[in-house]
Amino acid sequence: MNKRIAYLLGALICAALLGFGLYLQHVEGLEPCPLCVFQRVAFIALGLVFVVAALHGPGKTGAAVYALLGGLFALTGAGIAARHVWLQSLPPDQVPACGPGLSYMLEQYAVTRMLEKVLSGSGECAEAGWRFLGLTIPGWSLLWFVLLGVALVWLAMRSRRSTA
């Protein structure tokens, strides 16, 4: 497969995942919790890496840079999604209390304090309403972050082999 097409496929997967999230929000009425919003941001950043790589058609060094940058976004998103999955697995009596909304925290807190509160999770993040094949939304997000991160590493390794 052509590298540019592979990068474009990664970008399209990110766009499709974001589109499905928007569908669930605006058509199905599932409001995203703060951790969901941060996962969306990570998919946007990862998708942009794929788009730029598709437009650039990198060689060995460029593919390594895109793998490193995209890998950072994929790892960040996977970490947030893993935390979210963990919160959803807690027994009801151990779920943290619901906190203020993300917009309120953005207005009232310093960025570091807001990040700390969001990443600690809250009761709304522990709700697991939608499922497909036994996985919740953050479970699917975790899977896709891992797959897309591995794809970037694979593309970088493939670039090394083809120019070596």
Image (cartoon, rainbow, N blue to C red):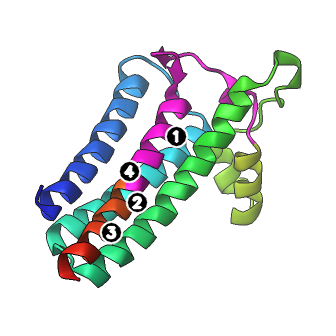
Q: Which residue is mark 4?
A: 148
Quadrant assignment for the C terminus: bottom left
Residue 61, quarter of the rendered image: bottom left
Mark sitting on residue 157:
3
Q: Position of residue 53 (x, y in %)?
A: 24, 69
Q: Which residues are magenta?
A: 121-150
Amino acid type at mark 3: Met
Q: Residues within 10 Å of mark 3 (few under 14, many from 20)?
A: some
Q: Position of residue 159 (x, y in %)?
A: 24, 73
Mark sitting earlier along the chain (4/2): 2
User: How far is disc 2 from disc 3 in space, using C-alphas?
Assistant: 22 Å
Q: Which residue is mark 2?
A: 45
Nearer the observer: mark 2 or 1; the answer is 1
Would residue 138 appear left or right of 113 to someone viewing this image? left
User: How far is disc 1 from disc 4 in space, using C-alphas?
Assistant: 10 Å
Q: Which residue is mark 1?
A: 142
Residue 130 lies in the magenta-colored region = yes
Determine the main secondary structure of the stretch shown in magenta. Answer: helix
Mark sitting earlier along the chain (2/3): 2
Mark sitting earlier along the chain (2/1): 2
Above or below residue 138? Residue 128 is above
Residue 85 lies in the magenta-colored region = no
Above or below residue 145? Residue 132 is above
Callout 2: SS: helix
Amino acid type at mark 4: Leu
Mark sitting earlier along the chain (3/1): 1
Amino acid type at mark 2: Ala
User: How far is disc 3 from disc 4 in space, using C-alphas?
Assistant: 14 Å
